[in-house]
Image (cartoon, rainbow, N blue to C red):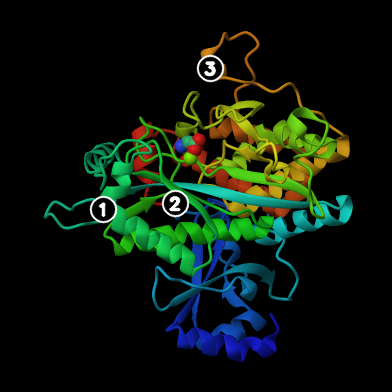
Amino acid sequence: MEMGDMGDVAGRLGAAGVRGVALTWVDNAGLTRVKTVPVGRLADAARRGVGMSPVFDVYLVDDSMTSSPHVGGPDGDLRLRPDLDRLTVLAGQPGWAWAPVDRYRQDGAEYPACQRLFARRQVARAREEHGVELRMGFETEWVVTRPPREPGGEPGGEPGAGGEAAEAADRELRYPCAGPAYGMTRLVELSGYLSALMEAATAQDLGVLQLHPEYAPGQFEISVAPADPVGAADLAVLVRETVRAVSVRHGLAASFAPVVDPAGVGSGRHLHLSLWRGDRNLCGGGTGPHGMTGECEAFLAGVLRELPALLALGAPSPASYLRLRPSHWAGVFGCWGLENREAALRFVAGEPDRSDAANAEVKCFDGAANPYLVVGAVIAAGLAGLEAGLSLPPPVSGDPAAGPEEGRPPRLPESLAEALRHFEDSAVLREALGEPLFGAVAAVRRAEIELFADATPREIAAATRARY
Ligand code: GLU
Ligand code: MG
């Protein structure tokens, strides 16, 4: 956006009743952090940026902090620069607009640990080095509950993570709907809430494809149309905060955590992707497996090869591994399959007459992930596959957990510690992320492993479900 247009923008925002603009970025723990400016200061923020400490790159899910070789401590400052092409008036939060930021150093250089700039760099590499573009879209699952009651009967905050507190919190889990999985009953029970959500999504042009009740109690899902990768990550942030805002206005709490109840089915945030050269979708109309082209196959093979390491970005919390269980449609096996919901990589061939709809879905990722890290790292892994001319192994059908152990595809990491080991060994991800960002991510993962080292699944769930 040209700065000359800024007067118009401020005028438009003012006319829409907007008073403040939320400028967000997502930290390495997966939490969306924010600074806000009044509408009158937006032009200045876009030009000069808004100050913010780099220390947030080593914040953990509980707001404690760790440090890494390049990040940590009280010194230094960054400039947050809103991307005004993404400026959106928030329908679920009257008086507010939103824009994601890129982060720069005070001397104007790109901040090397900025996750959104990392995603942008991978998009540029795909285009410049391989002449390909990616289309991506996240499916967002969440669980809606009634806020916990305080002893006096009033709604209050989530109790802490201690053993007794976790049990008390579990007893307090109250779902505002009782209908069955995927049941129309749930839609009837929460008709007002869900139609308000549709209204907000439409007003914000979120490009909603579907909204439906999911499997677990109180669980719903929203999917949006594919976009460019950075746009898809921005949308993931916007969708989540819109759902949260509408939930709050209906007296409900929305959790995007991998698990709310560790005994049940968790929430994923699957990533759909397709690879394009100009108008041609390389995932269809080819002579490879299920109609994919050789380039699509090599790209997906690169993603598949890197999945154990990618899990440290896409399933970044100790809570993620409470969700990643076989036979829960979470995609815990390191294999691919046509429409197979137990494969980490599910290929969707599209209808026979619509090869342009062909895409792949990475199922093992969840909502604790920083979506910018996810899209950038998946591109980096796919490009490495393209460069090496990799091929896919044969597809897997059925639930590998239901078949004999012999010949079963490999299980993806079963703990964050295991995923972190793969991440630290991944030359592809280390090089793509660059040391400052790579080191900060690894430090946050190590510190969260430590934070929850002695915690039970219920304690982990109780400590994380209100955070994401
Ligand atoms: N809730 C499942 C998960 O944890 C996904 C269900 C589905 O396939 O949409 O990822
Ligand atoms: Mg789903």
Which type of secondary structure does the marked residue at label 1 adopt?
loop
- Check whether the beta carbons of the residues at disc 2 and disc 1 lie within 8 A of each other: no
Residue depicted at 83% across the width and 31% down the height: 287
Vertical comparison of 198 with 340: above or below: below
Which type of secondary structure does the marked residue at label 3 adopt?
helix
Vertical comparison of 198 with 422: above or below: below
Counting residues from the start of the chain, the first of labels 2 and 1 encountered is 1
Of the residues tagged 3 and 2, which is closer to the observer? 3
Identify the disc placed on residue 401: 3
Of the residues tagged 1 and 3, which is closer to the observer? 3
Residue depicted at 62% across the width and 38% down the height: 362
Disc 3 beta carbon < 8 A from ligand 1?
no
Residue 422 point in image, percent of width and height: 67, 33
Would you name the residue on which mark 2 appears?
Answer: 468
Residue 114 visible to an observer of this rendering: no
Q: Sort mark 1 into few (<14), some (14-19) or many (20+) by Cα contacts within 10 Å.
A: many
Identify the disc placed on residue 225: none
Counting residues from the start of the chain, the first of labels 1 and 3 encountered is 1
- At label 1, the amino acid type is Pro
Residue 68 point in image, percent of width and height: 63, 51
- At label 3, the amino acid type is Ala
Would you name the residue on which mark 1 appears?
Answer: 147
The quarter of the displayed image where residue 18 is located: bottom left
The residue lying toward the viewer, choosing from 211 and 419, is 211
**Disc 3 to disc 2, C-alpha distance:** 30 Å
